[in-house]
Amino acid sequence: MTTVIDGKAVAADIREQLTNSVETLSGEGETPTLATVLMGNDPASETYVSMKHRDCEELGIEARDVRIDGDAPADELFEAVENLNADPAVNGVLVQMPVPDHVDKQAVLQSIDPEKDVDGFHPENVGRLVAGDARYKPCTPHGIQKLFESIDLDPAGKDVVVVGRSDIVGKPMANLLIQKEDGGNATVTVCHSRTEDLAAKTQAADVVVAAAGVPELIDGSMLSEGVVVIDVGVNRVDADTEKGYELVGDVEYESAAEKASAITPVPGGVGPMTRAMLLYNTVKATSRQEGIPVDLP
Ligand code: NAD
């Protein structure tokens, strides 16, 4: 029997628990506030930002929506971030990526106050995570740790193959999994575009986390019996649908599900978790900044 890991349900549970903490903070006059900054009008980014705002609203978190013209000088973006850093009513700041080409992405990440960096991408927060003292865990890998918990999977001693080495998924996932702490202690192999014989690596894994952004890169023939499969990929492929495309993961679901003991669907697996963990970090940031302890799920 293959368990289909229900990310929507796990995320709903986390959101419900966070609601109580938001009420505690709001009751003390410190309503959590998240500011998003979007430069340009990339349609996918617009969708992501509006989803984040909707999620906040549902929980009673206040959301600020800062928009900057895509052709504006980079300084306009830095000024906006500086203002949000300095505003005591704002607890979390995130700049929606990607930023336009004329803006230095690293400089943007470094411009955010690390205490308000709810994405966890500031070098100080990356360093703290690697050092085993994370302030804000990046949302997608943190959400995946919660999915492991939901199926009682302790990664300790397991062979985990992470496919992808991006700064937002692959690297922090690997770093969290090797920590000497709950949810860590795994033996981790990180594969990427230069890996020779990916199948040999994934076949030897107890757990595969696929985050390559390549539609259906991994199929059942590359997996061993009983493997746990976490599919992070969200890829648009042309299809005969109303929108003209459909979303597929990095895993070929049907053949992988035949081998797996547990697998996440796309959509409805990792995506809802990423969204829930941003709310988690925003609540955590507010609690830290205001010195009001709250329960975190
Ligand atoms: P990215 O493009 O920044 O990184 C992809 C990584 O995959 C790279 O490190 C690359 O080396 C590796 N890779 C590419 N081709 C490969 C191959 N053939 N074999 C092995 N490795 C290969 O992507 P990302 O931002 O990490 O996102 C990865 C996927 O996850 C995308 O589909 C993205 O849309 C999705 N994503 C989903 C969520 C979510 O919440 N569900 C969050 C973030 C990203």
Image (spheres, rainbow, N blue to C red):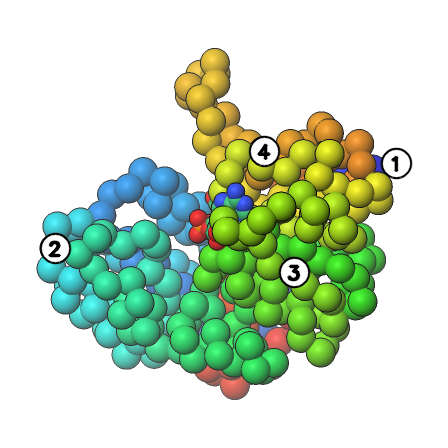
Residue indicated by mark 2: 72
Tell me if residue 97 can be seen: yes
- Distance, label 1 to label 3, CA atoms, is 27 Å
* Side of 157 where 76 appears, left or right: left
Element carrying mark 3: strand
Residue that carries the numbered disc 3 in the rendered image = 189
- Depth check, mark 4 against mark 2: the one in front is 4
Q: Secondary structure at mark 1?
A: loop
Of circles 2 and 3, which is in front? 3
Residue 70 coordinates in the image, percent (x, y): 18, 49
Q: Nearer the viewer, mark 1 or mark 3?
A: 3
Considering the numbered disc 4 on the image, is that residue within a helix, a strand or a loop? loop
Residue 269 appears in the figure = no
Amino acid on which the number 4 mark rests in the picture = Glu
Label 4 within 8 A of ligand 1 by Cβ: no
Q: Residue at x 82, y 58 (%)?
A: 152
Q: What is the distance, in whole Å, between disc 1 and disc 2 at their CAs?
A: 54 Å
> From the viewer's perspective, is the residue at label 1 or at label 4 nearer?
4
The span from disc 2 to disc 3 (Cα, nearest Å) is: 42 Å
User: Alpha carbon of mark 4 to alpha carbon of mark 2: how far?
Assistant: 38 Å
Residue at image point 71% right, 70% down: 184
Q: Nearer the viewer, mark 4 or mark 3?
A: 3
The amino acid at mark 2 is Ala
Task: Name the residue tied to disc 1.
Answer: 1
The mark that comes first in sequence, 1 or 2, is 1
Residue 16, how many percent across, how many down? 65, 56
Give the amino acid type for the residue marked by disc 1 in the picture.
Met
Tag nearer the camera, 1 or 2:
1
Badge 2 marks a residue whose secondary structure is: loop
The residue lying furthest to the front in this view is: 196
